[in-house]
Image (tube, coloured by chain):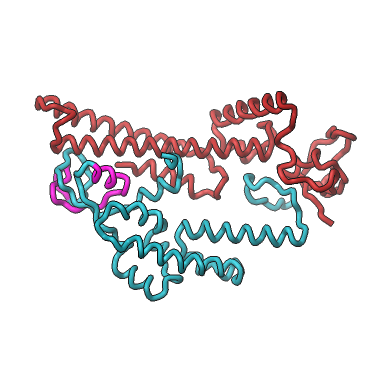
Chain colours: A red, B cyan
Amino acid sequence: MYGRKGYQLLKDFASGEKGQLKPFNSKLFDETIEECDQNHHLLQSLIRKMQQEDLDVPNNRNADHYGALIHHLSLMRNKRCLMAYVYNRAEIVRDLAWRVGLELLDLPSEIQEKLTSLEKEYFKNHSVALKSYMGKVGIELNVDMVPPKDPYIKVRILDDIDEGIVLSDKTTNFARHSMHFLKRTDAEPYIARGQMEELTD
Amino acid sequence: MSKYYDIDDILVEEEYVPVLFHKRANGVTIDPSAETNCAEQGSKVEVPFWLAHELQLRQAVSINLPACFDQKTRLEVQADAAYVDLRSRCPYFYEFGCKLEPLVTDRTLGILLSTAFKIRYKEALTKVYTAAHITASKYLSFLTKEETNLYEAAHLSSTAFKKWKTCGRRLERASILGRKRKDSN
């Protein structure tokens, strides 16, 4: 009652690592909405009681008014919690598109499990918007997130990648633990996803 | 207004404050000690800050200072501010105090907050550079959320500097993906 469920929802969100998602807590989300309904119901019954006593509802400040006020404030509080939950998750989804990759299937499966279908839709639409903007401007905006020093870097492959990946200058087979000398722009998306690592010596 | 979606702001406002009801409120179960379904005039109840703030704007309650800012804390801060366990008193000590300051009659709250912060901030920054992250863990459990954020920011910047000095890896796995889990095969 009185904003507890909204608070629990946000505590659940904040208990994850900063900047990372936990699975969408639909149970708590629905319980918060239920609490809002309860507050709304009690609010309406108090207002009806005031109307039955023939009191001027907006101006009369009696005990029922303050009770109705408290229910209204709790409802607004739960609303704020719900909106903040969805807003902050959407911010992380947008961040994923920039830092990891614009294709939904490029995301690791454990991240994909944590998103709801609506969030996946949001991710796809955001990627489409980014791609069309980058196409119109003519520059790829999501490469070179760190100021570049060399055009080529040495990498070691960490995960199994599909064979026969076509890079901008050659086709290679990436075996695990093998080392390659690649163009930085080609290797960057794989490093961001954790499938390769840069070797510095 | 710009903090509507801010999670920390919402969590700060959830802290409880003791209030004194000036008007009766019907149909609410806020007061656990009341037998009827209402809060009586003159009753003292603990409510969350967001509710107390709105009710005070409409002159239905008056807010008293919560226990985390009491005389015991003040004496401890005067004695040795750097090692007082503020997190157990209130994890959002400073933000909460700043929000309470214009609403309560106590004029010394602001001074308490600023002196405590000055001493503890200096201590936290010194700890980043002199103590290893593991040995400082007991000290870190005393820090409030705001101080922990500052400590972590300082720690991140000092590790980034060390990494830059030794020409470390520049392209990294995206931090948003979480920590790597080592594969068993």
Find out whether residue A151 is within the magenta segment.
no
Quadrant housing residue A100: top right
Where is B169 relative to A162, above or below?
below
Find out whether residue B52 is within the magenta segment.
yes
**B103 or B20, which lies in front?**
B103
**B106 or A187, which lies in front?**
B106
Q: Residue at x 48, y 45 (%)?
A: A13
Q: Residue at x 70, y 36 (%)?
A: A142
Where is B6 relative to B87, above or below?
above
List x then y, in percent, for residue A163.
84, 36
Q: Quadrant of the N terminus of chain B?
A: top left
Q: Residue at x 75, y 44 (%)?
A: A191
Where is A93 relative to B136, above or below?
above
> Would residue B126 be found to the left or right of residue A68 on screen?
right
Quadrant housing residue A114: top right
List x then y, in percent, for residue A88.
51, 39
> Would residue A133 be found to the left or right of residue A158 on screen?
left
List x then y, in percent, for residue B111.
35, 64
Q: Which residues are magenta?
A: B34-57
